[in-house]
Image (cartoon, rainbow, N blue to C red):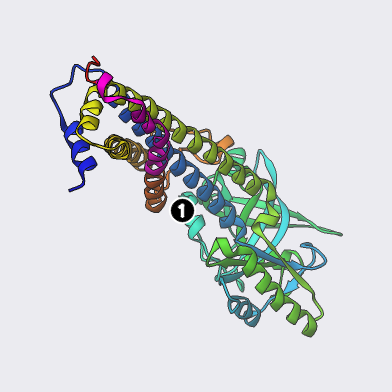
Amino acid sequence: MNFPLFIAKRIFSDKGDRRKVSRPAIRIATVGVAIGLAVMIITVSVVLGFKHTVRDKVVGFGSHIQVYNLQGNIMPISINDSTLTAYEAVDGVQQAERFALTQGILKTDNDFLGVMFKGIGPEYDTHFLEDCLIEGELPDFSDTKTKYPLVVSKTMADKLRIHAGDRLFAYFIGDDDVRTRRFTVSAIYQTNMKRFDDMVCLTDLCVTQRLNGWDSLQCTGAEVLVNDFDRLRETNRNLLDILRDNDKRDDEAAVSYTITDIYPQVFSWLELLDINVWIILGLMIAVAGFTMISGLLIIILERTQMIGILKALGARNSTIRHTFLWFAAFIIGRGLLWGNIMGLGIVLIQKYTGVVKLDAQTYYVNEAPMELNLLLIALLNVVTLLVSVFVLVAPSYLVSHIHPARSMHYE
């Protein structure tokens, strides 16, 4: 029989001493551990959800890797089906797709707005756009023929006072002339990312190619999606090797950039959130540890007479210390249980109801995003338990200074 564990169970389950000092101390310690764990679970879930939501929005419009002409994105690069196949054969690459950019002015009867037209073809992954639609339906984007469809942002639609199904003119200024095209608004999207919502509208790839005076193979570049974001730089290096091989055969030299290189300020900002998480986790574990230390000291002092009796019966100091450490582990376990219930409950409520709203202009999202990572939550439980028990080892040595003879008269 594990004697310290047996005694700890009896003390923990003893219901006859509710009026004693230790009961409030136990409750305070339990609440401290529970609140600390709940805050850690909520913090990790919010930060993970926020980082991945913002990252997915940036990737949704810019992909993971972009391939351009070495002379800059104003110069075209020739990309055919075999080129896309070569990109997709690179280790770590999921999909490659063409795009072409041009600038123009959208004009209604009362307003006008300068925008960036992004032409995309049938191979383009539109899942992100479909998730962001608030009005209308996405057209079938083409690289051969067009009905001049246009997908605009809610910001543009509000400024121009247009809706899905409306028709409007667009003006494109060249070196010697001004060309006019009439587009039909097929859909309206909203990402809450100002850099995209203020500038980017989408149409057929062949439209932007013709407006730029390019042939059917010339594009601004290619967007490449990867299988694993954590291997983004490794995949980009593999892709650069393919681009160098193509440069030896073709006249056009190409270069690739990761999304973190194109938007460094966004990803640097997201990385700063990790520092906040570590600070909060450290503070919450410290709070849980200090409440447990104070609770254990109170319990040891209140059980002085019991400690004296155990010593008188031959119990060693290590045995008594282990008894109180087991007792503390039971308290921590109860705190972890309630902490998980509170933390996971709040996360699930927010995840499925979105009761906590945010300013989309500041935070890029309308509501606080939540992402449950069960592995991290389990790790938080284990670390909280181990750290809380570890910090109690030193206070538990207080039992060594309790003498049986004097403790027998302790009240």
Q: Is residue 394 magenta?
A: yes
Quarter assignment of residue 94: bottom right
Measured as percent of width and height from the top left, residue 9 is found at 19, 37
> Is residue 12 left or right of 28 when viewed as pictured?
left
Measured as percent of width and height from the top left, residue 211 is found at 73, 64
Given the image, on which type of amino acid does mark 1 rest?
Asp
The residue positioned farthest toward the right in the image shown: 176
At mark 1, the secondary structure is helix
The residue tagged 1 is 131
Residue in the picture at 16% in, 34% down: 10
Quarter of the image with the C terminus in it: top left
Measured as percent of width and height from the top left, residue 356 is found at 42, 33
Query: Looking at the image, can residue 332 be seen?
Result: no
Quarter assignment of residue 162: top right
Quick check: 284 above or below 378?
above
Q: Which stretch appears magenta?
A: 384-407
Quick check: 145 above or below 173?
below
Query: Looking at the image, can residue 385 be seen?
Result: yes
